[in-house]
Image (cartoon, rainbow, N blue to C red):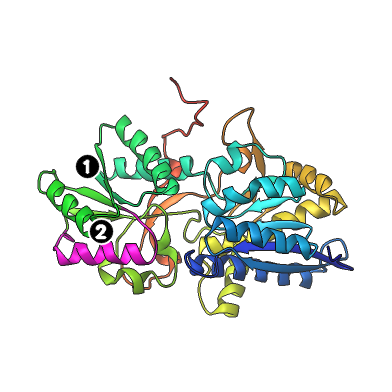
Amino acid sequence: MRQSHGHLRIGGLGPLSSPGIPRAGRELLDGMRLATRHINDAGGVSDRTLELIFEDTSGLPAAGLAAVARLRQQGVHALAGEYHSVVANSILDEVEHQGLPFVCASATFDEITSRRLSRVFRLAPPQSYGWRSYASYIVSAGVSHVLAVMENSQYWKAGAGVMESRLNESGIPFTRLEIDSKGGVVEAIERARASMSKLREPYMLLLLVGYPENLRSVLDQLRLQRLVTPSLILGDPAGRTIFEDWWEVAGADAAGIPFLAYEQPRKLTERGESAARDFEREYGREPSFVALEGYDSMLVLEAGIKAAGSIDPADVCYALRHTETKGTRGTIRFSTEPQGVVHQQWRWAPTCVVAFQHAYQHFSESDVLWEAELSKDKFHTKEERPG
């Protein structure tokens, strides 16, 4: 293993190629790269220059494991990033085995923190919190019935289960329209059309499909069958709407789709506003909340290493558990509960449901439809929920 001299090396992880979502990886990379420059301009970390080494995970577990191995060979002192939950979840055993601190920036699977691993910290809320929040928005919007056109994957199934549970509490039916290998997207949308003809308005169709191709196919079929009407609300809880190429994939008819965001428009911290201005100047676009998650992951590691006064992984992890960080979207502290999903988890990043009202609108100009912090709906871990 190659050793570093005078540098503090952070291994970044994210999808920069298909079948992952390259736009998500680019947001993470650019956010982390900007934070690295800001930290170094301010003197580095404990008199050491911060160096970011970013590896492509391609949205695939095997590629994620290979990326971690390459970063380890390059002598990194900590890991940060990743967008795809299936990738983040697949590398945890190796991260724990290597003993490196890992700040998971964007992946949301509950298992990432509910496994309660000592080296793993997370910024993004778990799926059971975020998707329950989205379901609470649906209840508040007066939707009569929710249909979900969905692929057969662990991520979509987990999200659908969270939403169905919350909607059932309020008496709102939830229907799955799974895309199978035989009928594909066309057959799933045919079933959606048959269901819609019997429903009271308004109803919602959730787009629980891969991006960009299956999402593009679903939206094309909806237009072809003339199902995009005022009666139908399209929903994207996974929040791909935030990415720059959304309008190329979804088209202008996709304006108004509510999506889940871990940033409140126009409510960044002072540090966040400064970072956003520099990001737009540097990269020519407004940072998404995914970019801010990447930026914050570097701030958290900087604070932890400074508090530890050491690059020893155990010392850094101890410091992360006990150190607050002024981030771009709020004060980050990692909470731990005796059991359940809240383990070395930021509880909670700003969580809201927002929508763009026209194509290529800036996130800072989007409409907030629902805020988790203002809701009376309570989140419980599986262990806390009343039986």
Label 2 sits on residue: 185
Residue 143 visible in image: no
Is 171 situated above or below 179?
A: above
Disc 2 marks which amino acid?
Val
Q: Nearer the viewer, residue 355 or 365?
A: 355
Q: Nearer the viewer, residue 344 or 73?
A: 73
Q: CA distance from mark 1 to mark 2?
A: 21 Å
| Quadrant in the picture for the N terminus | bottom right
Q: Residue at x 24, y 37 (%)?
A: 173
Helix, strand or loop for disc 1? strand
Q: Nearer the viewer, residue 75 or 141?
A: 75
Q: Residue at x 33, y 62 (%)?
A: 214
Label 1 sits on residue: 145
Q: Position of residue 30 (x, y in %)?
A: 60, 71
Span shown in magenta = 207-229
Q: Position of residue 68 (x, y in %)?
A: 68, 58
Q: Nearer the viewer, residue 354 or 56?
A: 56
Crowding around mark 2 (Cα neighbors within 10 Å: few <14, some 14 to 19, many 20+) is: many
Q: Position of residue 16 (x, y in %)?
A: 55, 69
